[in-house]
Amino acid sequence: MKKVLSLALAIALVVGLFAGVRPASAETKDFFMVLQVGFKQYALNGLPLNSEVAPEIISGRTFVPVRLIAETYGATVGWNPALRTVTIKLGDVEVLLTIGVNAAIIGSDTKSLEAAPYIKAGRTMVPVRLISEAFGLSVYYDSQTKSISIKSKTTGVVPGITGNQILIGSFSVQTGPYAVVGIPFSHGMQAYFNMVNEAGGVYGRKINLMVEDDGFNPAKTVTIVKKFVTEDKVFAVVGGLGTPGCLAVMDYLNDQKVPFVYQASGVSKISIPAKNYVFAVQPNYINEGQIFAKYVASTLGLKNIAVLYSNDDTGNEGLTGIKKGIEKFGGKIVVESPFPATETDFTSYLLKVQASNADALIMYATGVATGGNVVKTAKSLGLTQKIFLPYPHSGIIATAGAAAEGVYVTGWVDFSNPADAGVAKFFSIWRKYYPKDDPLTFSYAVAGFVAAEVFTEAVRRSGPYPTRDSLVWALETFNGWSGYLAKDISYGPNERSGKYSMFFMQVQKGALVKVSDWINVLKP
């Protein structure tokens, strides 16, 4: 699978005004640095900078220019050309290395090295973990992207963080008719956190999840989230269920500089324009619309496209995405027809499609009853165009019955292979902690599970001294990251959508069958 966005390219998304600028060492005691093997560009506290020599791996160890780490953290670096030794000193800690010698002297202790320091392009290259940990810094290596995150110890009090706990908040409907969605959503999160906590937590801290019932009422969501921030002092809000509540609190959380990770909504307003502390995960409708166009016009070669869409935020964003995708990948819209979100009779709309030269019909609305109605009506009218539906219609077989045969539906969490290790892991964890949950609600538990694994990975990358800002910077290092169920998640300094790739399924002999690889819209 191609990487969605390299760290170097992500850094380049930020304006280049900061290139080559390095903060004064006296002011950089608290920092979060991200480097990538093979690239001179790196990020310091979210700002893009350039090194004269790129990190590289020697004998399984990552080497970097010594001054890059040491002086950024405020240490002094001394070079003895006669002895070919470099001395790094900060406070009472002193590290002595010799070019070509597989040993380092740290204080009075001698430590053997897998590879010796060396000189490249006039810069002394040293093992990054040795130097960093000698001065109390934490180091995290991401093998997927070959990136290194280095974090200093936190100074001051961080809300929600103690020596043994990370306190986070979440809101979802827990009572009433919509609780069938909210309860498994929160159970999916808690199941993942239970697994993490039983294994010792993250750097010894257990993740404590507070779930509050907002009744799917955005006014109540605002009250709950303000309490999270001002009274409970949560570290972050993780997992918000529903578009109205998420939209009602996202600006407040961003203004308060509280990370808000994962919203169970596809509306693009959450991530576009990018808000520093707000990170979406689910595919937004604009990205999905582009994916429709790429697959339909480019992959399947169906160039003439009819689009029926609900005349609301969802449908209009989907249409916008389809048009953007057509600009990139070809094709043209031959029928463009909005309908009221409450529409139940689609005969006139579909007759217009039938009379056109359309090869494909994309129906963009998220109401599951709408999808079933459109598909059944199209079948009864004898339409021959291939039909494509967005991911909320993964239950199209249940809503359209035999008429669903041949219909395409997008997906963003792949359950096509029950033997897949990630799928098996999810079911084993969910059933272990919530054996009484209705198996038919597993898709809602999946959403919560994904929210939890994205957040937990970011906390790991933040190191043992997490702050809210370091969580943001850690998330920005996600570069096509994949967990058990979360796949291909990417962020950057100006990118907050998270999920840019999806796949397609088709109803074949009464079952949804995966018929495409992952398709992304960040790279053609």
Image (spheres, rainbow, N blue to C red):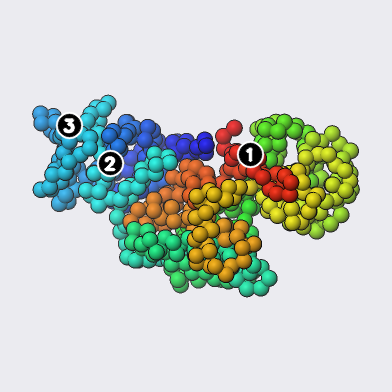
x and y, in percent, of residue 323 in the image: 71, 38
Looking at numbered disc 3 in the image, what kind of residue is underneath it? Answer: Ile
Mark nearer the N terminus (3 vs 2)? 3
Q: Position of residue 111 (x, y in %)?
A: 16, 44
Residue picked out by circle 2: 128
Instruction: State if disc 2 and disc 3 touch (CB < 8 Å).
Output: no
Tag 2: amino acid: Val
Q: Is residue 47 left or right of residue 120?
A: right
Instruction: Label 2: state its secondary structure.
Output: helix
In space, the residues marked 3 and 2 are separated at their CA atoms by: 15 Å
Q: Which residue is mark 1?
A: 516
Indicate which disc residue 99 carries: 3
> Residue placed at 43% from the left, 41% from the top?
144
- The mark that comes first in sequence, 1 or 2, is 2
For the point 25% across and 39% down, the residue is 127
Which of the pair 517/262 is nearer the observer? 517
In whole angstroms, how far apart are the C-alphas of marks 3 and 1?
Answer: 52 Å
Q: Which mark is residue 309?
A: none
Q: Residue at x 17, y 30 (%)?
A: 100
